[in-house]
Amino acid sequence: MKISKSVLGAAAVASASALVLVGCSSNGAETDSSAAADGGSTGDAIIKTNGSEPQNPLIPVATNETGGGKIIDALFAGLVYYDATGAAHNEVAESIETEDSQTFTVKLKDGWTFTDGTPVQAHNFVDAWNWGADLANSETALNSYFFEQIDGFSWDESVPEMSGLEVIDDLTFTITLAAPNAEFPLSLGYSAFYPLPDSFFEDPDAFGAAPVGNGIYTLADAADWQHDVQIDLSINDSYAGEREVQNDGLSIIFYASQDAAYADLLANNVDVIDGIPDSAMASYESDLGDRAVNQPAAIFQSFTIPQELEHFSGEEGKLRRAAISMAINREEITDVIFQGTRTPASDFTSPVIDGWSDSLAGAEVLEYNPEEAAKLWAEADEISPWEGTFEIGYNSDGGHQTWVEAVTNSIKNTLGIDATGNAYATFADFRTDITNRTIGTAFRTGWQADYPSLENFLGPIYYTGAGSNDGDYSSEAFDTLIDEGRTSLDPAEAAAKFQEAQEVLFEDLPAIPLWYSNVTGGYAETVDNVQFDWHSVPLFYEITKQ
Amino acid sequence: MLMYVVRRLLQAVPVVIGTTFLIYFMVFAMPGDPILAMFGDKTPNQATYDALAAQYHLDQPFLVQYGLYMKDLFSGNLGTTFSGQSVGEVLARTFPVTLKLAAMAIALEFSLAVILGLFAGLRKGKLFDNVTLVIGLVMLSVPIFVLGFLAQYFVAIKWGWASPTVGSDTSIANMWLPAVVLALSLFTTSMRLMRGTVIDTRSRDFVRTAYAKGLPGRRVIPVHVLRNSLIPVVTNSAANFGVLMVGATVTEGIFNVPGVGNTLYQAIIRGEGPTVVSFVTVMVLAYVVINILVDLLYAVLDPRIRYA
C-alpha cells in the first residue's frame, strides 16, 4: 500500500514533465520537416485551404451549403464551367444548341470518364437529373428545385423520368423546358446538373460517403475524408477537360471558426483561406500585404419590407420605402463598420455578373440624400400619419447587429422616427418567422447567386409567388419583363429586359438594397497564382506552390 | 466495495433518464425550425420540407419523438446526424480526442497545483507564496478565450513554438498548447486548496510526532504532509476533469480541436435533437463514472475511508 501511494505523486509529476518535454522536442522536429518540404522538390504541392464539414452526403444534388459545395465542385465536372469572370465555357458539353430557348440539344465530348473507369455519357446526365428531380428522393435531393423548369417536373407526385429529358444517342440528349428560358444554359455549370456514374444508382448512401466523379480532383479513398477534421483530394488523372491543374492535390481543412483558420494562415499552416474573421478585419490587409484578397462577390444584401406591412403599401408605401432608402448612408457604413469589405449597392444584382450596371434609371434612390428623404417621408405622412417604430429583424448569430444598428440609427436621425433592430437568437428562429409571415417587421435578406446570371438575382426573389419571395411582392410589369427576358433568344436583349425589370424594382423597392458582400481572404507566402472566381471560391487548380 | 460500485451505477439510471428527457425537451422547445435553417435564405419547397420533417420525425408531437428516440437508444442506435453519419461514429471519433486533451490538461493542472501549492504552503507568507497567489489570481480572472488567443498569437504565430491549430494531428506534441491553456485557467483553485491543507496538516499532531521521532523533513514532507493533503486537490481536479470531458468548447474552438465540445456546439446551432441528446447521455455517463473512480481513489489516499 505504501509504495503505491508515493508512486502516485511521483507518477503525476513525471508524466507532467514528460508531456512538456515531448511537446518541445517533437515540435522542434516538426518545424524542421516542414522547412525541408518548403525548399524540397518532392512534387508534393498539396494546396491546403479552409472549409467545413459537409452537412449533407457528397451527392451534387444533395449539397446546398458551401462546406460540401466546395468539395463537390472539385470532384465533378459539368456540361459547362465558369471562369474567374463568371463567363461560362463548355466543359463536358461539345455544344448546347437551341432554336427557341425551350428545347436544347446537348452534344457531349467523347473521351470523358468517371474515376471508376466508366464513360461519361448522355444517360449519366439524364439519369442524375431525373433522380434529383424525383419527389421520392426529395429528402436527399435538397436542390431539386433546379429541375423545376424542365418539362414533366412535379412537386405533387413522384416522376421517375421527366418527359423533358430524352437521350438521343450515347453522346447526345435533349432538354425541353416547360417554358422558354434563354438563361438556362448558364445554369448548367451549377452542381445540381453534374453527371453521376451508374454505380450511384445502386447505392446512393454509399456514394455519398465515397463519391465517384469526373472532375479535376478525386477522393481516392473514402478514408481520405476524416469527418469533422479534413478531406484530402488527389489529382484525377482521367480528367479530360481544358482546365490545367498546377498542383498535386487539395486538402480542405474543416475549421470551427474563421479565427482558427486565420491563425493558421499567419503561421503558413494553411495556404489559402476564403474568409477573414471580424477580429482581424482592421489588420488583415497590413498583416498580409498584397496577399490579402478583398473583391466584390455574387452576394447581395438588403432588407425586405413586407408588402402588407402597415404604412408600406400603395402610394404611401412607395414614398416611405424611397425615403428609408435615401436615409441610409451606405458609403459611411461600409467604410466604418465593414472597413471597406462591403461595396455599396447600386442595383439588385452584383458587380461580378456579366451585364451588371451601376447607372440604371432610378438607382439614385440608393444614394444618401437626407433632405429628399425627409421630404418624401413628410409627403407620405400627409396620406396617413406615421406612428410607431420602424424595426429591422435579424439573426444575432450571424454578426449582423452592428450594421443593423448603424442602418436604424441612420434612418432615425434622418427621418426623426424611432427605428431599432429586432434580434432573433438563431437563424432558424428568424427564418421560421419569415416563412410563416409572422415577423411583422422589415427583415434582413441576402442572396447568393447559384450561377452567374442577372435573372438569378431577380426571378427567384421578386417574381409573383416565387420560392424566396419572402416579402410577397407582386408586380405585373416586373413579371412581364422577366418573362420576356427569359424567352429572348439574344443574350444582350435578355440582359436589357432584366435591367428594365430592375428599374421597376427601384420604383417599388420591395427590398432596400444595402451593399454587395466582398469576399475577403488571403493566402500564405507558400503559394502563387491565387485568384478568386465569381462565386468567391479560389480557383484551386490554378494555384502553384513554391 | 463491489456492492458500493453497483449501487453507485444504479443511481446513475434515473440521472440518465432524467437528463435525456430534459435535454430532449429543451432542444425541442428551442425556437426556430431546423429544416428551414438548412436552406439558408432560400425557402424549401413544401414537398422537400415534408420529406425532411418525416425523416427526422420532426412532424411528430414531442412525446412521440422522445419515445422513438429512447426506443432507438435502448436498441443501441444513437441516431444519425443531418449529414447522415451515425451519431455513434461521431462520438467514437470525437470522444478520444477530448479525453486526451482533458487528460493532458488535468495532468498539468494537478502537477502545477500540487507542486506550487505545496511550496506555497511550506513558505506561508513568503515571497513565493505571494507570487504564486498573484499569478494564480490573474490566470483565474482572465477569461479563457483571452488566454487562448494570446497563447495562440504569441506562442504559436509569433514565436512558432507550437502549431496554432490542432486539426487532424491530435498527437500530444500537437495538442500541448491548448492543454497548457486549459491547465493554466484551472490550476489556481486546486493550488490554493493544496496550500491551505498543507498549512493545516503541518500543524497536526502526527506531523509533530514524526519530527519528534527525529525523522528528517525530506521524509516528513512527502510522506506525511503531501499525502495527507492531496484529498481536496484530487476531488477538485477530478471535478475539473469531468467538466473538461463534457468539452472545453471555447478552447476547442480557438485551437480547432476536433473534439466533443466543437461538435456539440455545431449540433446545437443546427438544432439536431438526436445528436445533442446522444452526446449529453454519454457525457452524463462519463461524468458519473469519473466521480465513482474519484471516490474509490480516496480509499487509496486515506486508509480511514472504507466503502461497504
Image (cartoon, rainbow, N blue to C red):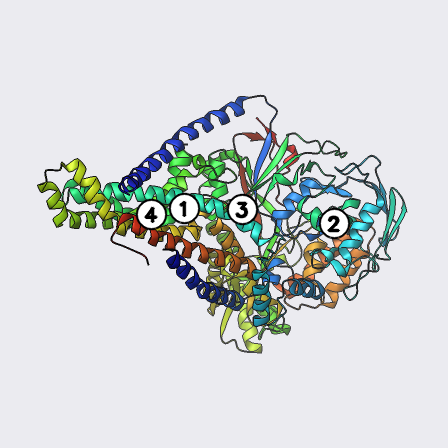
The image quarter in which residue A429 lies? bottom right
Could you say whether the residue bearing mark 3 is in a helix, strand or loop? helix
Q: What numbered label is drawn on residue B187?
A: none
Note whether A175 is above or below B65 in the view shown.
Answer: above
Amino acid, disc 2? Asp
The answer to whether residue A195 of the structure is visible from this angle is: no
The tag earlier along the polypeptide, 3 or 1, is 3
Q: Position of residue A515 (x, y in %)?
A: 57, 53
Query: Measuring 15% from the left and 42% from the top, which residue is drawn there?
Result: B123
Could you say whether the residue bearing mark 2 is in a helix, strand or loop? loop
| Chain holding disc 1 | B
> Pointer 4: what residue?
B185
> Pointer 2: what residue?
A203
* A367 lies left or right of A469: left
Label 3 close to label 4 by CB (< 8 Å):
no
> Pointer 1: what residue?
B102
Note whether A506 is above or below A105 in the view shown.
Answer: below
| Chain holding disc 4 | B
Do the residues at pointers 3 and 1 share their chain?
A: yes
Do the residues at pointers 4 and 2 share their chain?
A: no
- Seen from the viewer's position, the closer of residues B143 and A537 is B143
> Pointer 3: what residue?
B93
Amino acid, disc 1? Ala
